[in-house]
Amino acid sequence: MGKSQRAYLGLPWIVSLILAIIPITQLVLGIVTALQRGNTLMVVIRVLSIFFYGIIIWILDIISMILHKDLKWLV
């Protein structure tokens, strides 16, 4: 599989974009992706985003998916 399968769990870009738009799946899959990539700081930030600043993380994930076709900034 090529470059198109990078973001959430190796899914195609368009599927990952749709999942990033849905807030609940974005939260869960963002945590799982950060765990897979070994970035524990981002896991903590994403878990804290449940309580504090979740909308900012959500918007950044959508923008990152559109621009880079991957989660570049917060993973």
Image (spheres, grey):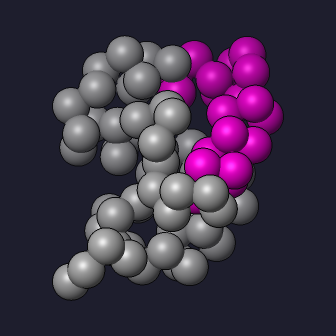
Determine if the magenta segment contains residue 30. no
Q: Give the vertical position of 46 relative to 37 (above or below).
A: above
Identify the image quadrant of residue 37: top left
Viewer-proximal residue among 6 and 34: 6
Q: Residue at x 52, y 27 (%)?
A: 46
Identify the image quadrant of the C terminus: top left
Determine if the magenta segment contains residue 62. yes
**Secondary structure of the magenta portion, mostly?**
helix
Viewer-proximal residue among 54 and 5: 5
Q: Residue at x 49, y 74 (%)?
A: 13
Residue at the bottom extreme of this rendering: 1
Tell me if 21 is positioned left or right of 70 in this view.
Answer: right
Q: Residue at x 51, y 63 (%)?
A: 69
Q: Which residues are magenta?
A: 46-65
Tell me if 65 is positioned left or right of 72 in this view.
Answer: right
Q: Give the vertical position of 32 relative to 43 (above or below).
A: below
Identify the image quadrant of the N terminus: bottom left
Tell me if 19 is positioned left or right of 31 in this view.
Answer: right
Q: Give the vertical position of 50 relative to 16 (above or below).
A: above
